[in-house]
Image: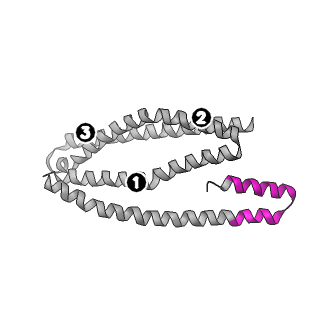
Amino acid sequence: MLANPLFARFAVDSIIRGDARSALFYAVIVSAFWAVGAARRTVDTRTFTRIYADLAAPVILNQRLQNQSTSTAAARVVLAREFIDLFEKHVPTLVSVVGAVAMLLAIEPWIGVASLGTAVQCMALLPRFAQRNQSLHQRLNDRLEKEIGLAAKVGTITLKRHYHVLSKLRIHLSNREAGAFLFVGSVAVVLFVIVIS
């Protein structure tokens, strides 16, 4: 997909020249991109699901050896799944961003430089953002580790408080994600203005 802009450029040039056959070649290339993307996703799911299946049982057995509660073991298995999701979903996104910047540097150097500068600024902001998110996730996971024990032992008020705190933590994480999404969108708008200027 990273090469898509390059092929799109050739297709637009072909259409402008009136060479529809060359433009149709672009449709074949895009179809191939999508087929490879679909195949990659099915392979990814199979691969990462197997990794999780191989990891989950040892995590639970290790928690038993350490005399951890069932809820702690369950929460840590969920955390293991989130860790695997990082590699399945977020690492490909990072590779796509780096590849997109490289393609822009090759195709449109000034836009590529602006994109590279933006990416560097975002990377500079990332550690602080990630540290705060890590703190929120830690609090959320600590609460989830106690959830089964709470369900078995405590009364209505404590249960309501527990789930109220969980919802507040999830809302706070969601708000941060929405803010990051808006920030990235705003940066994209700025880059778009640079492109059309």
Instruction: Say few, some or many: other residues with alpha carbon within 10 Å of mark 2 (under 14 / 14 to 19 / 20 or more).
Output: few
* Residue of label 2: 117
Label at residue 85: 1
**Residue 62, quarter of the rendered image:** bottom left
Asked if residue 117 lies in the magenta stretch, the reply is: no
Residue 141 or residue 127, whichever sits in front: 127
Q: Hey, which residue is sitting farthest right in the picture?
A: 18
Residue 192: x percent and y percent?
68, 39
Tag nearer the camera, 2 or 1: 2
Against 43, is 119 above or below? above
Q: Which residues are magenta?
A: 5-28
Q: Mark 1 or mark 2, which is nearer the start of the sequence?
A: 1
* Residue of label 3: 161
Mark 3 near mark 2, Cβ–Cβ under 8 Å?
A: no
Q: Amino acid at mark 1?
A: Asp
Q: Main structural element of the magenta stretch: helix, strand or loop? A: helix
Q: Amino acid at mark 3?
A: Arg
Residue 93: x percent and y percent?
51, 50
Against 130, is 151 above or below? below
Residue 146: x percent and y percent?
21, 46
User: What residue is drawn where x is 16% and y is 44%?
Assistant: 155
